[in-house]
Image (cartoon, rainbow, N blue to C red):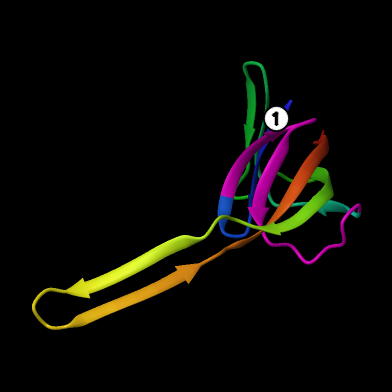
Amino acid sequence: MYAVIKTGGKQYKVAAGEKIKVEQIAAEVGQEIVIDQVLALGSGADLKIGTPLVEGATVTATVLAQGRHDKVRIFKMRRRKHYQKRQGHRQNFTELQISAVLG
């Protein structure tokens, strides 16, 4: 069974046993969280689509790690104007282990 969940403004297709990296969630490492924003549930040819959410469907996950992605370097330049700007950004993430898809 798989589910399409919404967290951090993004959508992810998940199944039990998978590991995913999502936008940062305020939770401790080892803590179990419940995601109730399930947009769709499916198993084989059977698919249940919510309007916009599937009633009573939840996904439980365990927080494996809190971390930061690799640095993205931003470089802006205007030719002939003596303008150069360097900037970097590292996005925070939470790594989840999906333990169960209930619905």
Mark 1, Cα crowd under 10 Å, few <14 / some 14-19 / many 20+, is some
**Residue sitting at the far left:** 80
Q: Is residue 57 visible?
A: no
Which residue is outermost to the bottom? 82
**60 or 103: nearer the viewer:** 60
Residue 41, magenta (yes or no): no
Give x and y (percent) for residue 77: 22, 73
Q: In this orientation, does residue 45 appear?
A: yes
> Which element type, helix, strand or loop, lies under badge 1?
strand
Q: Name the residue under label 1.
A: 2
Give the vertical position of 19 relative to 1 (above or below): below
Q: Does the magenta stretch include residue 14?
A: yes
Residue drawn at x 21%, y 82% as measured from the top left: 83
Residue at far top of view: 45
Q: What residue type is labelled 1?
A: Tyr
Viewer-nearest residue: 91 or 1: 91
Quadrant placement of the C terminus = top right
**Could you tell me which residue is drawn at 70 percent across and 52 percent down?**
37
Q: Where is residue 15 in the image (x, y as percent from the top left)?
A: 73, 31
Q: Is residue 64 left or right of residue 50?
A: right
Write the residue at 36% across / 74% down.
86
87 relative position to 14: left or right: left
Q: Position of residue 97 (x, y in %)?
A: 79, 41
Instruction: Please provide the residue range marked out in magenta.
Output: 11-30
- Give residue 82's quadrant in the image: bottom left
Q: At 68% from the left edge and 35% from the top edge, which residue is drawn? A: 14
Q: Is residue 102 above or below residue 9?
A: above
| Residue 40, placed above or below residue 82 | above
Query: For residue 91, what is the image quadrant?
Result: bottom right
